[in-house]
Image (tube, coloured by chain):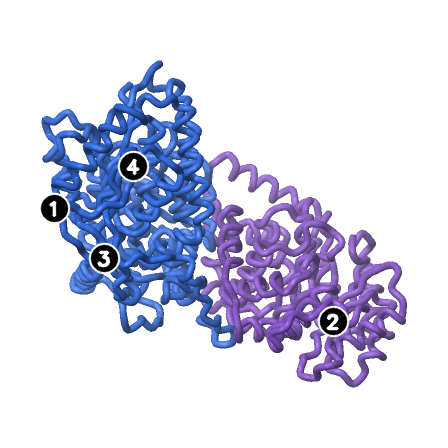
């Protein structure tokens, strides 16, 4: 893809022509272009063939009405999940956790302890499912890999100059290769929000593609850092760029910026992966990360998944929680559901 | 796309917050009294057909007693009372409604059949908000823009429908009381219980006797109230047919009248609409409260270029709607209020099929007892079909298409009603243009069925006249 100034300037002209009111914008591309036409992956690849085409496509996506999206998310947050449904949701949520530690102070000891927790979240109860993955910085991937040897728990590594992403592409790719070489099964990259906000969509897409190819067989999660994207329209566009670039997951946040994951943001991303699949693309997963600490929060996200995209996404292969303290709350609530007695915070290990 | 993995367990709201009395009298002059010349009738739960209570049907003598009590209270206590004192009573009612909100919501859901989620999150909070709002006006009437010293009209006879029994009672009572009038309220015969609980709250708030009176009963009771010479102002919300009859009765009398009647609102979706939210808005527009909403968006006007995509997305969304026990906190669609209303919906839906429209409903099992109708969409609807012209007042959406903004306006206005309309587009200039050209009392932009006490609501043409809510809502209750 070309990211030359020429392409950008051409687009500035077309959009100012639209602002003058002359031709209408070309309708809702997501529905008029690929949806239900069976055009499939070919049409999707087509929209990314040039900076201009990509920009046209992104701006042709149906808008997101902020008030409407927020009120839909708020309405779903009132769902009351009880009894067997609650237990199912708690256990499903446990299996979807990417148990995360991303601190400057992380040590091999801390990561090893976290891995033990990931394998068997509740040593007193072997029926508790393991979590989906442990998420660490690249230099600790090897440690995590060793500690999780022989277990189905994956190792995810953040990369690409996480969390800011402010480094040259060569550095970012080296970061990714490093993590993959150390055995990372999943790579959580960050998009260049500066490039996105300045309208260099092709640049963002090219980076995602380059990282995807550096990932090799490792799964790629693309962090949009929605707290810095400011609008839901941007969240939807960034989701599409990530998916067009080959993301296996789109992820809300690094956890280092506030606001991190919110229900309306997750709703918009779920709608994006749904529309992408409906237009012939693969089913891309969604990971919500940052600020999700309680079982109540987790269940609200699962309700959102359930009523927006349904069964196909109610699986650790397509939905994840990036969290650290959430797991213990899920364990406490699970034990409460099963025994009828409230568990205490010290009944579960702290890592 | 109904989920099979994540099946919500029943989450019923407890009925124990409500104490149902076996028998309810009339609320006259501050007391619950037995009817003098009336009879009794029963009110049932439409979701189970269970008899909830026996209720008094007020006869002409009872109506007379209530009107006399109201006239006395207006003359001796409520009318002369300074506005700032009246405000205190209204604030007290509003606070008591909030304190007893669970009780009100559960009772409303039981008697009406609406989902507890709506009664809890919409009906009751909005009803309390109306009292809070008009309490604030009670001592500021001179600044309402209606003249320097507006006077109360006198006794207001107020007749409310069964679709939002408590909320409509609040819409009627709050402005009337703030303006210094006294009230005789007649709730609908299928949903009298929340008005009677409100009467209890009025008693608890210590309102002087006779300021608020509640006479339960059917059409006869309403007719007696409308015709009573002691009534100075009639406010009616209900069917266009009854509204016309009331207007005929009042012709030539001194009584003032406001009517809030039926509607056949168009919800207009342009091809540049925020699609996901438009689909939510369509669902909320017609399936909120089972479509028992006078301003329901019962005609979907969708631009041809996106019609298939919108209908497809709408159907996928309807598959996730949860129909069933109104007291379950996860229920989206409750019961139809009465067998009579169910028959009317069935008859009109049948006419849609007979006319040649295509009928579609999601897969959903209807409960065996009670009155139920599944959410239904008709496509291929021509403007001449009855389902495109007549108010169905049920969960039935007629989908029509248009090609240009002019055609959208022409079709939206092609109705005898004029209560509400919705516009969905990301283009601000088009929203303003549409709002100027749509003949409807309320035009929602990129939303639907949103209500607020500060915003006037009402229609024109066969949807009635007069406004409720906001500063404008005071006008109906003041002699300026």
Check disc 1: other Cα within 10 Å, few if <14, some if 14-19, many if 20+: few
> Image quarter for residue A333?
bottom right
Q: Position of residue A346 (x, y in %)?
A: 77, 69
In the rendered view, tell whether residue B40 sits above or below residue B140.
Answer: below
Q: Is residue B160 above or below residue A45?
A: above
Q: Name the tint of chain B in the rendering.
A: blue
Left or right of A72 in this view: A176: right
Is the Cβ of the residue at disc 4 closer than 8 Å to that at disc 1? no
What residue is shown with label 1?
B37
Q: Colour of chain A?
A: purple
Say what secondary structure mark 4 lies in.
strand
Q: Chain of mark 1?
A: B
State which chain disc 3 sits on: B
Q: Mark 4 or 1, which is nearer the eye? A: 1
The answer for how far apart the CA atoms under marks 4 and 1 are is: 21 Å
Seen from the viewer's position, the closer of residues B239 and A22 is B239
Per the image, the residue denoted by label 2 is: A186
B357 relative position to B129: left or right: left
């Amino acid at each position: 893809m070309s990211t030359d100034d020429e392409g950008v300037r051409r687009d500035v002209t077309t959009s100012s022509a639209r602002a003058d009111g002359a031709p209408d914008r070309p309708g809702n591309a997501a529905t008029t272009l690929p949806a239900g036409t069976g055009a499939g992956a070919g049409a999707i690849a087509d929209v990314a063939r040039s900076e201009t085409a990509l920009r046209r496509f992104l701006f042709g996506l149906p808008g997101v009405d902020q008030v409407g999206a927020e009120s839909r998310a708020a309405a779903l947050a009132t769902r009351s999940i009880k009894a067997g449904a609650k237990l199912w949701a708690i256990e499903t949520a446990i299996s979807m956790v990417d148990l995360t530690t991303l601190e400057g102070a992380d040590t091999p000891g801390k990561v090893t302890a976290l891995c033990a927790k990931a394998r068997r979240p509740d040593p007193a109860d072997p029926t508790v499912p393991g979590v989906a993955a442990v998420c660490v910085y690249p230099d600790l991937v090897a440690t995590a890999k060793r500690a999780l040897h022989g277990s189905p728990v994956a190792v995810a590594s953040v990369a690409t100059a996480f969390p800011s992403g402010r480094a040259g592409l060569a550095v970012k790719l080296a970061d990714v290769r490093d993590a993959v070489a150390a055995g990372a099964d999943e790579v959580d990259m960050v998009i260049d929000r500066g490039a996105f906000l300045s309208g260099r969509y092709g640049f963002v897409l090219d980076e995602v593609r380059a990282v995807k190819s550096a990932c090799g067989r490792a799964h790629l999660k693309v962090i949009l850092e929605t707290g810095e994207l400011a609008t839901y329209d941007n969240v939807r566009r960034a989701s599409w760029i990530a998916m067009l670039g080959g993301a296996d997951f789109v992820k809300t946040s690094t956890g280092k910026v506030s606001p991190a994951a919110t229900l309306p943001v997750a709703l918009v991303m779920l709608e994006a992966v749904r529309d992408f699949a409906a237009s012939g693309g693969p089913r891309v997963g969604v990971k919500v990360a940052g600020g999700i600490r309680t079982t109540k929060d987790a269940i609200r996200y699962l309700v959102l998944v359930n009523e927006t995209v349904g069964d196909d996404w109610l699986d650790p292969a397509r939905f994840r929680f990036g969290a650290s303290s959430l797991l213990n709350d899920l364990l406490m609530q699970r034990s409460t559901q099963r025994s009828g007695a409230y568990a205490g915070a010290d009944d579960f290990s702290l890592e | 796309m109904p989920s099979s993995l994540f099946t919500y367990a029943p989450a019923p709201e407890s009925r124990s917050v409500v104490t149902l009395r076996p028998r309810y009298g009339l609320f006259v002059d501050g007391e619950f009294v037995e009817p003098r010349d009336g009879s009794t009738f029963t009110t049932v739960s439409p979701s189970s057909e269970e008899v909830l209570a026996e209720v008094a049907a007020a006869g002409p003598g009872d109506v007379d007693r209530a009107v006399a009590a109201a006239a006395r209270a207006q003359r001796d206590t409520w009318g002369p009372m300074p506005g700032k004192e009246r405000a205190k009573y209204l604030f007290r009612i509003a606070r008591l409604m909030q304190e007893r909100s669970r009780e009100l919501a559960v009772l409303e859901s039981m008697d009406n059949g609406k989902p507890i989620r709506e009664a809890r999150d919409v009906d009751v909070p909005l009803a309390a908000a109306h009292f809070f709002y008009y309490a604030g006006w009670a001592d500021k009437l001179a600044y309402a823009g209606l003249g320097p010293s507006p006077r109360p009209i006198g006794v207001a006879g107020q007749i409310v429908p069964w679709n939002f029994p408590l909320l409509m009672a609040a819409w009627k009572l709050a402005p009337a009381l703030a303006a210094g009038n006294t009230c005789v309220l007649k709730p609908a015969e299928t949903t009298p219980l929340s008005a009677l609980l409100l009467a209890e709250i009025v008693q608890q708030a210590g309102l002087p006797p006779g300021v608020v009176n509640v006479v339960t009963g059917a059409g006869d009771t309403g007719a007696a109230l409308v015709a009573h010479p002691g009534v100075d102002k009639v406010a009616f919300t209900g069917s266009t047919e009854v509204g016309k009859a009331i207007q005929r009765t009042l012709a030539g009398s001194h009584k003032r009248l406001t009517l809030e009647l039926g509607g056949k609102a168009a919800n207009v979706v342009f091809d540049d609409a925020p699609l996901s939210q438009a689909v939510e808005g369509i669902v909320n527009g017609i399936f909120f409260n089972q479509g028992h909403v006078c301003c329901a968006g019962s005609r979907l006007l969708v631009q041809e270029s996106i019609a298939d995509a919108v209908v497809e997305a709408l159907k996928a969304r309807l598959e996730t709607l949860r129909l069933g026990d109104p007291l379950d906190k996860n229920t989206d669609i409750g019961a139809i209020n009465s067998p009579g209303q169910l028959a009317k919906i069935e008859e009109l839906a049948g006419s849609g099929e007979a006319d040649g429209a295509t009928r579609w409903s999601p897969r959903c099992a209807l409960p065996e007892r009670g009155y139920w109708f599944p959410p239904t969409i008709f496509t291929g609807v021509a403007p001449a079909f009855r389902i495109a012209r007549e108010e169905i007042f049920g969960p039935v959406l007629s989908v029509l298409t248009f090609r240009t903004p002019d055609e959208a306006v022409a079709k939206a206005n092609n109705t005898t009603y004029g209560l509400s309309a919705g516009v969905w587009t990301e283009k601000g200039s088009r929203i303003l243009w549409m709002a100027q050209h749509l003949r409807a009392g309320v035009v929602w932009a990129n939303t639907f069925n949103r209500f607020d006490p500060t915003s006037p609501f009402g229609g024109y043409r066969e949807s009635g006249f007069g406004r409720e809510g906001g500063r404008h809502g005071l006008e109906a209750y003041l002699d300026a």
